[in-house]
Image (cartoon, grey):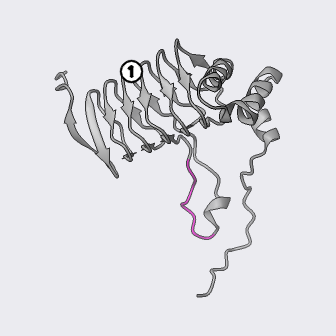
Amino acid sequence: MVEKKYKSEKVPQFRDSVYKIISRHKLSYRQIINLSVYYGVAKYLPWGIGTKVRTFLCRRIFKFTGKDVTVLVGVSFGSGINIKIGDYSSLNRDCWISNDTIIGSNVMMGPEVIMLSGSHNFHRTDIPMREQGAPPRKPILIGDDVWIGTRAIILPGVKIGSHSIIGAGSIVTKDVPEWAIITGNPAKLIKYRKEPVES
């Protein structure tokens, strides 16, 4: 099979580095130290003391952290400086949370949940997609009292209504109403926990 030859037009590529992340987010020395300790050590500490250390650091990294928040082993969140998480919510083992996610109170999630607020441009066909940059980020908003099952993936810009349930392994591509139970790929409404009130 002959490999396609792309035009030689130069397009600026998005290449990340620690320095670029620090300068782009304008991180303070304190934030840099907290992130370094988190990703260098605390992220991998076992249950118990590790959970307490991670939660302590996230209180100093996130934009807002409510009461009794739990951060388990292996959680990643980029720089984390724009994340807000409400009271009694938890980030389970090996979850990946985008830097600009907003999570309400009493939110449970299973292991390995992924929340993505970024994407890639792909409209041009004359150059590789990796050279086309990224569209503006679309933050994910999660209401209160939500249960997100293991390995669910939530795509950019999705809003998840309060009191809803996301089935394990679901890929959520559009907004979820309050009290809904959804599952599948792409995720679809199965039923309501409580019938929505007509407005």
List x then y, in percent, for residue 196: 19, 25
Q: Which residue is drawn at 58% across and 26% down?
A: 83
List x then y, in percent, for residue 128: 64, 66
Q: Is residue 5 visible?
A: yes
Q: Which residue is drawn at 57% across and 17% down?
A: 65
Residue 169 appears left or right of 14: left
List x then y, in percent, for residue 112: 50, 42
Amino acid at pointer 1? Asp
Q: Is residue 26 visible?
A: no
Of residues 42 and 78, the one nearer the viewer is 42
* Residue designated by label 1: 144
Specify whether residue 121 is painted magenta: yes
Q: Residue furthest bottom?
A: 1
Q: How crowded is mark 1: few (under 14 residues within 10 Å), some or many (20 or more)?
A: many
Of residues 75 and 131, the one nearer the viewer is 75
Q: Is the magenta stretch mostly helix, strand or loop?
A: loop
Answer above or below: position of 105 versus 175. Answer: above
Specify whether residue 48 is painted magenta: no
Q: Which residue is drawn at 44% across and 36% down?
A: 110
Residue 128 appears left or right of 40: left
Which image quadrant is residue 122 in? bottom right
Q: Which residue is drawn at 57% across and 55% down?
A: 121
Magenta segment boundaries in residue numbering? 119-126
Residue 70 appears left or right of 174: right
List x then y, in percent, for residue 1: 58, 88
